[in-house]
Image: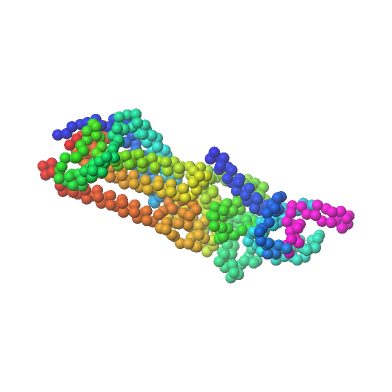
């Protein structure tokens, strides 16, 4: 039963992620958002074709109505897009206005896509995210150093679907699932993985066999907790390390000075300081980590009881010695 | 001059020795996991799991042994007059012993434990140890119990019970070992646990 669970969990994560990123998957457009998204009407000019798996147009040469499949990369799921961090954008905020004609003009193929830093770098509005440091960390990471320039931010952060979970999601387990699904999209999917390398994709379950309670760990922490170098000035670590540098020492997390305080729970810790006497209360809210969850008052009380007992024994022993029978 | 009563049959001595050994290992590994990591964490976790299971088996041995052998009768007590018996024994340990009074409840073939001993043994062995075993097994299979049934709050309560019981039983063990020095001689009670004979004053 445990074995099945450990196998099915990552598969479930991959499927969940696939559901999120598969743009325009059949049947996924049924549930419209309650409130009309900001630029929904204007964007419909693009999404009436790019919002589905199939699009229809009139062939003006033959006069036929043609139905064609939309390329996956060019398909945008409305719900996913409008719920994403860029969901209040117009399509033409980033793409040329000239796409309003069909067939699209050939010269638009030369359009260079924006990168994250084109908007986010050196802007006081985004200073708290520290995109500059994120870029530095990413460039030092194994993703950047081992791959060509084709490994961009977009590999993990699809601009049409990305959600800022670490700062906004209250349920830490949803953040964990979302974050891990980004890694597993390639690391548990041979086809995706081999788009960038000819190497075999290592089996994640086998590689982590040494990890006790594997399923609990996979559900309770993100991959990056152990696989990236912490940067003090960014919320989420982007410097993904080679496997030999991954954290393998249990007490890095299982201690009162838990690594998790600087990683998974960093945002929560920044928002609310310890409360109710619990050391690392941020962790305690949603998880249980042996060695990291302690109660300050219980610690004091236990020391008092233990000290009192020892003192009692010392006094009792002393009195026994003092009052012992003289003839013995 | 002292008499010798055969009070501790071999199975009790075997159980007692194993219980003490397992408990010491569980205390050491438990403390290491929670506070200091003087034993490597993953080793401490494995040892704690293994000896927790062994302690359970040993406890069942003790529990069944007390059901089927006459030893169980020593744990039977009555509520009536319990408090005054406890007070009498407590007075002896805190005052009478220093005046070289006779123990109010001397050890006989029919009464292995004095009232205070009996009461703490019943609480420790029939309440605290079962609680620490049950909560320990729950922690051994967190996925089954907590994710599907009780949630994180259940996990926290379970863990708190486990740790508090572990602490109280450790304190019990400390006092228990100290009280063993109050025998016919300083070491006679320790010898009893090897040869099975209790020496009276």
A51 inside magenta stretch: yes
Q: Quadrant of residue B92?
A: top left
Compare residues B166 and A102 and report the one nearer the observer.
B166
- Compared across the picture, whether B42 is left or right of A79 comes to left
| The residue stretch that appears in magenta | A42-67
Residue A179 picture location, percent across and down: 58, 54
Taking B45 as reference, is B125 left or right? left
- Assess whether residue A47 is covered by the magenta stretch: yes
The residue lying at 52 percent from left, 64 percent from top is A233
- In the rendered image, residue A302, in percent from the top left (x then y), is placed at 34, 52
The answer to whether residue A149 is visible is no
A65 or A239, which is in the foreground?
A: A65
Return the residue found at the far right: A62
Residue at the image position 22 percent from the left and 33 percent from the top: B108
Q: Pick out the residue farthest to the front.
A: B80
Q: Quadrant of the N terminus of chain A?
A: top right
């Amino acid at each position: 039963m445990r074995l099945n669970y450990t196998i099915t969990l990552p598969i479930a994560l991959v499927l969940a992620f696939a559901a999120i990123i598969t743009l325009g998957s059949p049947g996924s457009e049924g549930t419209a958002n309650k409130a009309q998204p900001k630029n929904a009407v204007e964007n419909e000019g693009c999404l009436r074709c790019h919002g589905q798996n199939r699009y229809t147009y009139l062939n003006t040469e033959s006069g036929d109505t043609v139905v064609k499949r939309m390329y996956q990369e060019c398909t945008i799921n409305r719900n996913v897009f409008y719920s994403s961090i860029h969901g209040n954008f117009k399509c033409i905020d980033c793409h040329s206005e000239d796409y309003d004609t069909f067939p699209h003009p050939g010269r638009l193929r030369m359009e260079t896509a924006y990168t994250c830093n084109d908007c986010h770098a050196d802007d006081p509005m985004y200073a708290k995210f520290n995109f500059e440091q994120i870029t530095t960390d990413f460039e030092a990471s194994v993703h950047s150093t081992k791959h060509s320039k084709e490994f961009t931010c977009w590999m993990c952060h699809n601009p049409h679907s990305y959600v800022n979970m670490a700062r906004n999601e209250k349920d830490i387990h949803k953040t964990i699932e979302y974050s891990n699904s980004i890694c597993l999209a390639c690391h548990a999917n041979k086809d995706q993985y081999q788009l960038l390398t000819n190497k075999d994709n290592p089996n994640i379950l086998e590689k982590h066999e040494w990890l006790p309670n594997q399923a609990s760990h996979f559900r309770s922490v993100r991959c990056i907790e152990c696989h990236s170098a912490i940067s003090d000035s960014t919320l989420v670590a982007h410097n993904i390390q080679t496997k030999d540098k991954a954290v393998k020492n249990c007490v890095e997390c299982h201690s009162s000075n838990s690594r998790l305080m600087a990683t998974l729970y960093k945002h929560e810790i920044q928002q609310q300081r310890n409360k109710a006497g619990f050391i690392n209360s941020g962790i305690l809210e949603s998880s249980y980590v042996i060695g990291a969850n302690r109660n300050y008052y219980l610690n004091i009380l236990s020391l008092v009881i233990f000290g009192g007992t020892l003192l009692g024994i010392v006094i009792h022993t002393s009195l026994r010695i003092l009052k012992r029978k003289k003839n013995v | 001059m002292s008499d010798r009563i055969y009070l501790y049959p071999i199975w009790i001595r075997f159980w007692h020795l194993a219980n003490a050994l397992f408990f010491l290992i569980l205390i050491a590994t438990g403390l290491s996991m929670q506070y200091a990591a003087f034993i490597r964490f993953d080793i401490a976790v494995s040892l704690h799991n293994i000896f927790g299971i062994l302690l359970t088996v040993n406890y069942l041995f003790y529990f069944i042994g007390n059901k089927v052998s006459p030893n169980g009768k020593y744990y039977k007590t009555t509520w009536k007059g319990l408090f005054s018996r406890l007070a009498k024994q407590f007075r002896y340990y805190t005052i009478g012993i220093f005046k070289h009074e006779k123990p109010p409840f001397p050890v006989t073939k029919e009464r292995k434990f004095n009232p205070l001993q009996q009461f703490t043994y019943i609480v420790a062995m029939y309440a605290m140890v079962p609680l620490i075993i049950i909560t320990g097994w729950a922690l051994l299979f967190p996925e089954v119990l907590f994710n599907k049934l009780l949630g994180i709050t259940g996990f926290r309560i379970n863990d708190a019970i486990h740790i508090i019981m572990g602490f109280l039983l450790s304190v019990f063990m400390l006092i228990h070992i100290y009280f063993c020095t109050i025998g016919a001689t300083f070491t006679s009670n320790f010898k009893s646990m090897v040869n099975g004979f209790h020496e009276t004053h």
